[in-house]
Image (tube, grey):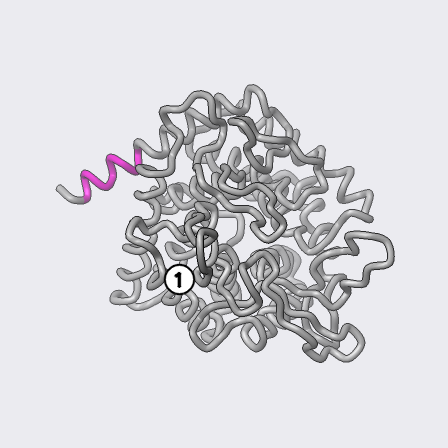
């Protein structure tokens, strides 16, 4: 009876996400949504770091539904990204977010050779951002003239290393994997605190590799615990273990997952930071919950039965709460699938709104429960 009830809400959730995405696709088309404002997704340029999530969600839904209209839009998004890939100057560490969910997805599903080549180009550009002295992949380019952020690495890049692992696998060249593992080893050494919480930003001296500072970034404070950064770490470390088989990554993924799960509120959807004070602590981040749920489901398949139950049950509680308490299924005036995402609180940008990456990870996590892959990080 319990499995029947569980399957019922999962199927309902999937059906409603598919229906809403089909409706949204008629307006968004091959655009690049980021955050919803006033019920409608604002479209960004193809160089923005979230450009892969909309086509990635379309591919995920197409893989299960066979809806050719979704596939056509995803392919057009991928083609639009060529101007960024070939233009070079606007590329940064988020090449994984952008080309895993577009070109790698296309190649996995259709065998498209042009998509394989696009993804390999992106992997080469990502590998070129590796700093040998500090053993990290550099994050951003300068935001303004004269700025030097060549020593910055961020926890988000845990997810981008999957592009390098993929490139090693399809080419047979271990160099990409070596860079990915070197970066992830640096994550183990410098980003994860003993209690399983993580730093968003670590600053290195780019000439010597010495750590100079650890920063809160999009979290509340340097020593706080930004929930989406925690989710990036859970998922990224589980993926690194999936690709490499290195036990240190698995143990760290469990350490971070245990921190995350034991600090969730009663409805299982995280606040935007696990260590805040005052009114700011009331804000949720559904995108952190959705990302963590997908990562926890991957992790559940990597550990012993007892631990597996903990992570799978935790993921299912998050997912069901997102569906029942944060979904927009009865609201035709809201394009986002999930309410109450928090993008960047310290900069007061896109607070308490739907976020496209929250929608993507929610759909992906549902697909994991349904065993409706493939999954483009793996």
| 340, above or below 172, in the image | above
- Residue situated furthest left in the rendering: 1
Q: Is residue 345 left or right of residue 296?
A: right
| Residue 107 point in image, percent of width and height | 60, 42
Q: Is residue 281 visible?
A: yes
Q: Which residues are magenta?
A: 3-11
Please, what is the dominant secondary structure of the magenta stretch? helix
Q: Image quadrant for the N terminus?
A: top left
| 111, above or below 70, in the image | below
**Quadrant of residue 172 within the rendered picture:** bottom right
Q: Which residue is mark 1?
A: 260
| Residue 225 point in image, percent of width and height | 49, 63
Q: Is residue 115 left or right of residue 2?
A: right
Q: Could you say which is closer to the camera, residue 348 or residue 37?
A: 348
Q: Is residue 166 visible?
A: no
| 132, above or below 321, in the image | below
Q: Could you say which is closer to the camera, residue 9 or residue 141?
A: 141
Q: Residue at x 60, y 27 (%)?
A: 73
| Residue 258 point in image, percent of width and height | 36, 66
Q: Residue at x 42, y 29 (%)?
A: 18
Q: Residue at x 62, y 65 (%)?
A: 201
Does 8 appear in magenta?
A: yes
- Residue situated furthest right in the rendering: 146
**Quadrant of residue 275 within the rendered picture:** bottom left
Secondary structure state at the residue bearing disc 1: helix
- Residue situated furthest front in the rendering: 278
Q: Is residue 305 left or right of residue 362?
A: left
């Amino acid at each position: 009876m319990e499995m029947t009830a569980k399957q019922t809400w999962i199927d309902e959730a999937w059906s409603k996400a598919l229906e809403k995405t089909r409706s949204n696709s008629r307006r968004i088309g091959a655009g690049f949504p980021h955050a919803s404002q006033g019920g409608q997704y604002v479209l960004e340029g193809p160089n923005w770091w979230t450009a892969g999530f909309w086509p990635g969600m379309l591919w995920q839904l197409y893989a299960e539904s066979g809806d050719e209209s979704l596939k056509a839009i995803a392919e057009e998004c991928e083609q639009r990204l060529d101007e960024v890939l070939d233009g070079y100057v606007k590329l940064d560490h988020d090449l994984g977010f952008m080309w895993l969910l577009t070109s790698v997805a296309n190649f996995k599903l259709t065998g498209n050779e042009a998509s394989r080549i696009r993804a390999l180009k992106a992997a080469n550009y990502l590998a070129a951002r590796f700093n040998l002295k500090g053993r990290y992949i550099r994050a951003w380019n300068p935001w303004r003239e004269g700025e030097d952020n060549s020593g910055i690495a961020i926890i988000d890049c845990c997810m981008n290393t999957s592009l390098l692992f993929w490139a090693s696998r399809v080419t047979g060249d271990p160099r990409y994997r070596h860079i990915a593992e070197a970066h992830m080893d640096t994550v183990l050494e410098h980003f994860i605190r003993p209690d399983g919480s993580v730093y968003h930003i670590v600053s290195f001296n780019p000439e010597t590799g010495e750590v100079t500072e650890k920063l809160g970034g999009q979290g509340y404070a340097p020593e706080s615990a930004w929930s989406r950064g925690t989710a990036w770490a859970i998922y990224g470390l589980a993926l690194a273990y999936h690709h490499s088989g290195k036990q240190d990554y698995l143990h760290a993924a469990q350490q971070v997952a245990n921190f995350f799960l034991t600090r969730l509120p009663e409805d299982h959807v995280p606040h935007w930071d696990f260590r805040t004070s005052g009114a700011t602590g009331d804000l949720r981040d559904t995108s952190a919950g959705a990302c963590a749920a997908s990562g926890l489901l991957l992790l559940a398949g990597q550990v012993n039965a007892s631990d597996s139950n903990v992570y799978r049950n935790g993921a299912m509680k998050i997912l069901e709460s997102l569906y029942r308490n944060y979904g927009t299924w009865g609201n035709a005036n809201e394009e986002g699938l999930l309410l109450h995402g928090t993008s960047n609180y310290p900069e007061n940008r896109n607070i308490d709104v739907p976020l496209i990456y929250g929608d993507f990870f929610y759909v992906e996590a549902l697909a994991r429960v349904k065993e409706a892959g493939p999954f483009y990080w793996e």
